[in-house]
Amino acid sequence: MTDGELPPAPPEVASVVPDDPARARLQSYAEFLASAGVERGLLGPREVPRLWDRHLLNCAVVAPMVPAGAHVIDVGSGAGLPGLVWAIVRSDITLTCLESLQRRATYLEEAVGALGLTDRVSVVRARAEDVVRGRASESSLRGDVVTARAVAPLDKLAGWTVPLLKPGGDLLALKGQSAADEVEAARTVLERLGIDSVEIVQCGEGIVDPPTTVVRARKAR
Ligand SMILES: C[S@@+](CC[C@H](N)C(=O)[O-])C[C@H]1O[C@@H](n2cnc3c(N)ncnc32)[C@H](O)[C@@H]1O
């Protein structure tokens, strides 16, 4: 394997995604990211050799936290992480990718078409805060789960995501080592927005190193 080349799927993929058609679709998405994603600047070429562990598996191990049949909103979806990975491995969910940049939203629409997911996945080009404030055409958009990865610190992200949750819904924010500090900094704003429980969950121990750290913030019913 040379630098920048997509490695074969590691053996852990089979345990995280036991379903054959879903695994084949995940492979197609990996190839799409490694080709069109890099050519169009959504993914750095240096990320390709670590695409499986650092990006695809890192997101896939969180998918069991999504309740059955949920509608998920992925805020700042970028190249489709984690939203498209979850839609691939969980055929029971529907997904809206919310992305502010037109270029990225166009890419996402193409990815959704290429992966045959148009019946369950839609793409909205808008800033999340404009949707929250009713300034975007999709201002009625609400999810059972709202997720975000690498978009903003939790205190800022909370204002763009918690209002998009249905009562009883979960914000699942994929975070790194700063998760506990971010939760502390965001505690007041989370309470003001109606969050009544917050926990930090490690996903994928023994599968991805380090495990994926998720902040789960549940909105009161
Ligand atoms: C660093 S990228 C992360 C993309 C993806 N979530 C990932 O983990 O690879 C952040 C993305 O959030 C989008 N974004 C930033 N602010 C946003 C906002 N207020 N509303 C919607 N999307 C936003 C950016 O355009 C960009 O695609």
Image: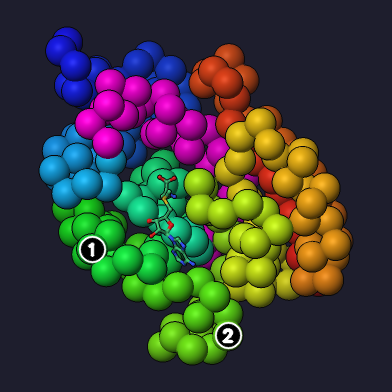
Asked if residue 163 is positioned above or below residue 58 in the image, the reply reads below
**Magenta segment range?**
44-72
Q: Which residue is mark 1?
A: 103
Q: Which residue is mark 2?
A: 133
Q: Residues within 10 Å of mark 1 (few under 14, many from 20)?
A: some
Residue 63 place in picture, x, y as percent: 53, 42
Taking depth in this image into account, of 140 and 36 the one nearest to the observer is: 36
Residue 129 place in picture, x, y as percent: 54, 75
Q: Are marks 2 and 1 in contact (CB under 8 Å)?
A: no
Say what amino acid the circle numbered 1 marks: Arg
Asked if residue 181 is positioned above or below residue 14 in the image, the reply reads below
Q: Is mark 1 within 8 Å of ligand 1?
A: no
Relative to residue 179, is residue 17 drawn left or right? left
* Residue 57: quarter of image: top left
Residue sitting at 73 percent across and 46 percent down? 182
Q: Residues within 10 Å of mark 2 (few under 14, many from 20)?
A: few
* Residue 25: quarter of image: top left
The image's mark for residue 15 is: none
For label 1, the SS is: helix
Residue 107 place in picture, x, y as percent: 22, 58
Relative to residue 58, is residue 30 drawn left or right? left
Say what amino acid the circle numbered 2 marks: Arg
